[in-house]
Each structure stands twice: as C-alpha cells, then as structure tokens.
Image (tube, grey):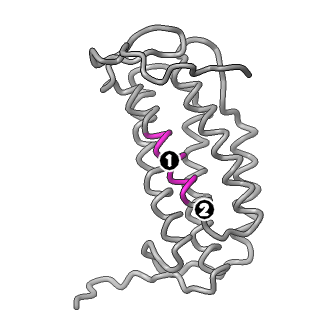
Amino acid sequence: MGNRLSKIYTRTGDDGTTGLGDGARTPKDSLRINTIGEVDELNSHIGVLLTESLPEIIRNCLINVQHKLFDLGGELSMPGSGYIGISADHTTQLESILDKLNTPLPPLKEFILPGGSRAAALCHVARAVCRRTERSITSLAKAEDVSTASLIYLNRLSDLLFVMCRALNVYHAQEDVLWKPGKAD
C-alpha cells in the first residue's frame, strides 16, 4: 500500500478546517466531520471491546464491523464521489449473526441496564455510541447526501450490539442487570 502518512502533522488544519477525501476543505465542526468523528469513536470503543475474552463468533463479527466502519468513514469523507462503503448485503450479514446470537437467549421480559460482565458493559458503551452515531448520520442525511444503506447498517448494528451484550453476559456466566422501576436506595 505504500507510505500513506509519511508526515503526521501537516499544519493544514491549524485554521480550524480539515480535508475531505476529494481535497475540499471543511470546518472541523461541520456536521459531516462530526459524524465521521462519531464513526471513529464507535470503532475505537469496539477496539476496546475486542481486548476482552469473547466468543469467536462475536470477535470475528466485531473485527469485520471495524473494517466496515472504516469503509463508512471513507464514504462520508468523499461526498459525491460515488464511493459506497456500506451496502444492503452488509446489513444482511449483521442480521444473520444477530439471529444466531439471539436464538439461544432467554426471552427478554424486562428492560435491562448496562452491566453484568465487563465485556457486556463495554459492549453497552459501544451500543450507546452507535445510537449517537446513528442520530448524527440521520441529521447529516437531512442536510447532505448520505447513503440509505449506511443509515440502515448503523441501526442494525446497534440492535446487534444489544444482543451481543446479552450473549456476552451468558458467555461470562453473568446475569443481565434488570431495571427496577422506582428503585431507590
């Protein structure tokens, strides 16, 4: 692939702008850059989750998700280029894994709180960041072109991360933490 980043600091962003994939400059606080940053943050949280003990199906899925999130960041950084990083097939892959993980879980009769095992708690953080990322990309789609497939992918990913939280608690022999309405100490 060669040396893509031979110099880490360029000073080109010192004026509060950053470069997009097409070479255009945009403010660092633009909705597009904010959304790209949230995709990056989600990817980072998944990276932290990957440091935990995980079932192989979850580990392999999350590694693939990290690559797809990088593709999504690329798609968002090149508006109008025609580059598509996320397709309907990618969402179908998430749904397949979601079904495999959810089938053996006991039916959910109560709302659950983030927690249980450390891995599940980290997965809940990734899920919450995924939801925020989904909100940002929805806002961006109202103002600029964003692929519908990307919106759907993030929505399904947040569903998958929720099911992964429950599966990780089972894997680590921990109970889901059930919400008790009105509970006071």
Which residue shows up at 27% across the image and 15% down it? 15
Q: Secondary structure at mark 2?
A: loop
Q: Is residue 126 magenta?
A: no
Q: Give the labeled residue for mark 2.
A: 51
x and y percentages locating residue 45 in the rendered image: 50, 53
Is 128 above or below relative to 185? above
Instruction: Give the alpha-carbon distance from disc 1 to disc 2, as whole Å.
Output: 15 Å
Q: Give the labeled residue for mark 1.
A: 42
Quarter holding residue 170: bottom right
Which residue shows up at 30% across the image and 26% down it? 29
Q: Count the numbered circles shown.
A: 2
Which residue shows up at 54% across the image and 37% down it? 151
Compare residues 129 and 8 and report the one nearer the observer: 8
Is 69 above or below relative to 107? above
Three-letter code for the amino acid on which mark 1 is drawn = Leu
Is 96 above or below relative to 7? below
x and y percentages locating residue 9 in the rendered image: 42, 22
Three-letter code for the amino acid on which mark 2 is drawn = Thr
Is 50 above or below relative to 101? above
Which residues lie in the magenta part?
Answer: 38-48
